[in-house]
Amino acid sequence: MADIRAARPRAQRLPVNWHLALLLALCVVEAIVFFWTVLNRVTANFPIGFDQLSYFAYTYDLIARTMSGGWIVLIDEFLHPRQSNGISFTVQGALLGLLFGSNRAVLLSLNLAYFLAAQIILFQTVRGHTKNVESAWIAVALFTGCSTIFHQGGIYYFMIDFSAMCLYGILACLIVWSRTFLETRRIWLIVVVAAHLIIMRFFVVLYFAGIMFGLLLFAAAGLRSPSSAWRAIAKKRVTNIVIAGSLTAMLVLPILFLARQGIYNYYVIGHVIGVEKYIRADQFGLHGLLDHVFHYPKSVSEHLGRSVFIVLSILSATALISAYRFDHAWTHRVLARLHRYRAEYFALGLMIVVPIVVLTLNVHKSPLVGNIVLIPLILTFALVLGAVGRHAAPPLGKDVEARWPWFLRLTSSQPVERIWTAASKHSAKAIITTFVAVALLTTFATRGLSYKDPTSQSDYAAITQLNTAIGHYVIDNKLLKPTFSIDRVVGYLNWGTLRLGNFEVLRTWIDFDPRFGAGSYGIFATPREVALKLIKDSDIVVLTDPVQARDPTLPIDRKIIEYWDELDAWTRRNRVLLTSADVYGVPHRVYVRDLDRTTAHN
């Protein structure tokens, strides 16, 4: 008898190890799919896109400075912040580049690392909270099925948004794991992750402050409970929340203070005081109050994706039907369980609502940042669903561990009962887990391997031709800091593509100096005299078309029609045509200084 009792704990641990091993194996396959796609579909093409180009360029520059100046350069990034929206993302990319090679595939693997970590921690959190491994697998499957993973700003884009989404989700899991700051030993990890997230994206400090303040009020309300036990719990939560918030502030406030000028210029001027916010709102068609209010809820649904939304609906319906079918007292039990973990659900609610409210109040809208709430949303659903489904299926005999999950047991007919009983002898949990894991892997692999860049190969060829021709011209003529102008704001031909693209193709770092079509002369309406002056001051000028494929919401595209013919005439007279190509059906002509004629004249 003693031997049997001793063997039971070991037998109970085997399923835990098996599920985790299976999840880790799936992570390995996901990594293989990721690198195959990156090497064959992403890095094989010329780099484009404003935001990720700036991150790539800064990271490459940081790698070069570290190789020449030593590791102190990375430390100096925190002492003298040069980036206005976050620091640690490019520093982490630089570390990866220094360790494994300075190329786009290595830098993009930073997204993969956060993605895999988020899956594992989400799985462990749901399983530990619900004591239901099927709910944990469902949560991971829902997360990996979200549309945002393979869309713009997703795992194949070197931008803060995707990694910040994963890290924010990890923070949500840790808060649940700590039983909402009830476990003192676990708050230290929350502090580390929260500080890291804020340093990665400064704007998140507003989310964290709102969440912590809301939790503090929630915990403080419990101090008035008539129960001494609940008052003790509330007191412990208040203490831990104050400690965690204070420690996080001690870690991040010095860096935020050092970066205050950049933060002011980027967020206060760019997002609050300046007029750019109205231009961006106009681009998204946001003209009234309701447009702004519903923008991010719609954005979140788009990041979630139609297929995940359908699965969420089906699972919700089956949980309710199954619970009602087999447990007529389920309402009382579910409400009791939800009440028991009300602090965790309240914390997750804050982690969903606070970012949406803060982002909505900001007139400067973005199509990417709404993905920040996806993991808290899925985690909330999985935990609530676990509470609903906990008593939704009756036991099959005495083998409680061999129950069929609630979402598959919707009838109690005798033929089906015999099938369930027979299947339970062959480990129903293993069957269901394998099915969900295979579905998860198939979905990720299919979407990952079928990833197709929205830019066609013919357009990529034209983009490469234009950018590399300019690079060859600069190198051949030994220009140290060539000035560059373009008559429209596009993500495939600008100072960023010229710097990064030619570094990858020609292995030469060229410090292009942007003029017309960049910075304050980018999307804003540049006066005729200023535009002409900037064109005359440029070594390279790119002209396209005065009307074709221009964005009517951008002031520059509306204004340039007034004087484009004059820019074109002056450039034809005073510059030499280097190359031309059509991109997205728009003609692009590259003009350069005739340096031989200029030298002879001098």
Image: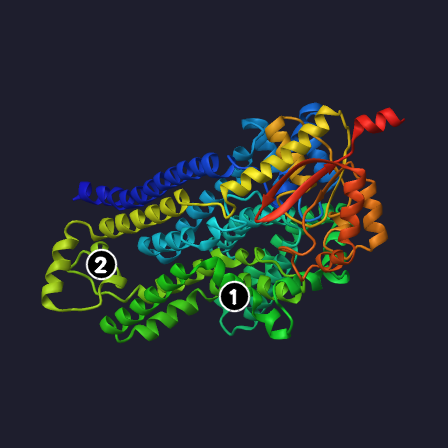
In the rendered view, tell whether residue 589 sits above or below residue 409: above
- Residue type (three-letter) at the residue carrying disc 1: Lys
Residue annotated with mark 2: 404
Residue 522: percent from left, percent from top? 73, 51
For residue 561, above or below residue 115: below
- Nearer to us: label 1 or label 2: 1
Q: Can I make out residue 72 in this image?
A: no
| Left or right placement of residue 275 versus residue 204 in this view | right
Rendered residue at 65%/30% (across/down): 63
Q: Residue 494 at what x, y percent from top left?
A: 68, 42
Give residue 332's position: percent from left, percent from top. 34, 75
**Image position of 4 (left or right of 141):** left
Question: Which of the marked residues, 1 or 2, is nearer the chain's N terminus?
Answer: 1
Residue 14 or residue 108, whichever sits in front: 108
Q: Which residue carries the number 1 mark?
A: 298
**Mark 1 residue crowding within 10 angstroms, few (<14) / some (14–19) / many (20+):** few
Kindly identify the amino acid type of the residue bearing the numbered disc 2.
Trp
Q: Kindly report the distance in space between the C-alpha atoms of the residues bearing marks 1 and 2.
A: 36 Å
* Residue appearing at x 77%, y 34% in the figure: 482
- Image quadrant holding the N terminus, namely top left
Q: Position of residue 477 (x, y in %)?
A: 75, 25
- The secondary element bearing badge 1 is classed as helix
Disc ID at residue 520: none
The secondary structure type at the circle numbered 2 is loop
Look at the numbered discs 1 and 2 and tell me whether their residues touch, using CB distance below 8 Å: no
Q: Quadrant of residue 33?
A: top left
Identify which residue, 224 or 255, lies in the foreground.
255
